Every structure is written in structure tokens, then in C-alpha cells.
């Protein structure tokens, strides 16, 4: 029998994350599933070839991780008050880290926005959602955060 007991929700802390929350909450409630949040900080490998290079980025990695952890704590407290929500901060390729974590944590479903930031970031780094859909071991529900609820 198909059971979905754990939902993984990748967040980027932009307004688009808020627009997807009703879907995450509804699915968790209807399926009786727990929610886990993940935020991935880009690894230094994403900056190879840039003028400032990986050495520059590596010097700020600890600060980015600390900032990500603080933002994740605030997000979980504000968006899921009173609930015990598991959170993870990872470093590396966003798509790969989401897929790896989903396998490692026993995720049964991933709910992800089709767009994070608009514009150049999407063009430069490609679509994380498309990569997760292609590589995930479990079902992936994609939600367009700019059309959600409209």
C-alpha cells in the first residue's frame, strides 16, 4: 500500500516559499505526514570560473551556513508555529543535495516550487525543480508559486 509519511519541502526564503506553504500544509494534513524543510547553500564549486573564484566564496561559507540556519529557524517558527518541524541545511549543488537528502531521510514526497527567484538566476543556474523531478526516487509535486491560489 502506498503511504506518504514524510514530505520534504526545499525552501529558499524568498516570497515564493510562502506561496507554496498552503500546499505543503494541506498535503501533510491530508496524508498524516511529517514535514521536513531543507535549504541548500550553494557550494564553492558553483563559483569556479568566476572572477573572484572559489577561494573568495570559501571564506564566507561558514557565515552563509550560519545565516541559513538562522533563517531556517525563523522560517520554521513563523510558518509552522507549535509544530516540531525537522530542518536541514546542506552545502553543494542544490538539486543534488535535495535528491541526496530525500533518499537519506526516507522522504516519501517532495513538494517544490517551479520558480524561486525570477530572471537571471533561473537562466544562469537552470531549473532546480526540473532536476529534482528527473532525479528523485519519490513523487514530486511542483507548484508554480506565482500562480498558486489564483
Image: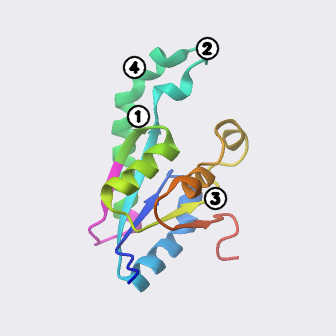
Q: Residues within 10 Å of mark 2 (few under 14, many from 20)?
A: few
Q: Are marks 4 and 2 in contact (CB under 8 Å)?
A: no
Q: Reading the chain from its start, which is encountered first: label 1 or label 3?
A: 1
Q: Which residue is mark 4?
A: 59
Q: Earlier in the sequence, mark 1 or mark 4?
A: 4
Residue on which disc 1 sits: 64
Residue reaching furthest front?
1
In 3D space, how far apart are the residues under numbered discs 1 and 3 (Cα atoms)? 24 Å
Q: Position of residue 109 (x, y in %)?
A: 45, 68
State whether residue 13 is above or below residue 80: above
Magenta residue span: 78-88
* SS type, badge 3: loop
Q: Residue 51: which disc?
A: 2
Category of crowding for the residue at label 3, using alpha-carbon neighbours closer than 10 angstroms: few (below 14), some (14–19), many (at least 20): some
Q: Secondary structure at mark 4?
A: helix
Check disc 3 and report the residue beneath it.
Answer: 114
Q: Compare marks 2 and 3 and give the one earlier in the sequence.
A: 2
Mark 1 / mark 2, whichever is N-terminal: 2
Give the vertical position of 123 relative to 84 (above or below).
Answer: above
Placement of the N terminus among the 4 image quadrants? bottom left
CB under 8 Å between callouts 2 and 3?
Answer: no
In the rendered image, residue 59, in percent from the top left (x then y), is placed at: 40, 19
Residue 60, placed above or below residue 119: above
Amino acid at each position: 500500500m502506498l503511504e506518504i509519511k514524510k514530505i520534504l519541502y526545499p525552501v529558499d526564503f524568498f516570497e515564493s516559499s510562502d506561496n507554496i506553504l498552503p500546499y505543503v500544509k494541506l498535503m501533510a494534513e491530508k496524508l498524516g505526514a511529517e514535514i521536513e524543510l531543507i535549504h541548500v547553500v550553494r557550494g564553492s564549486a558553483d563559483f569556479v570560473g568566476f572572477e573572484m573564484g572559489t577561494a573568495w566564496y570559501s571564506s564566507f561559507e561558514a557565515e552563509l551556513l550560519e545565516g541559513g540556519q538562522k533563517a531556517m529557524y525563523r522560517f520554521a517558527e513563523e510558518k509552522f508555529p507549535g509544530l516540531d518541524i525537522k530542518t536541514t541545511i546542506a552545502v553543494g549543488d542544490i538539486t543534488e543535495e535535495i535528491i541526496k537528502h530525500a533518499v537519506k531521510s526516507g522522504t516519501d514526497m517532495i513538494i517544490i516550487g517551479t520558480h524561486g527567484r525570477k530572471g537571471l538566476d533561473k537562466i544562469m543556474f537552470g531549473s532546480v525543480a526540473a532536476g529534482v523531478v528527473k532525479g528523485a526516487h519519490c513523487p514530486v509535486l511542483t507548484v508554480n508559486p506565482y500562480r498558486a491560489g489564483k
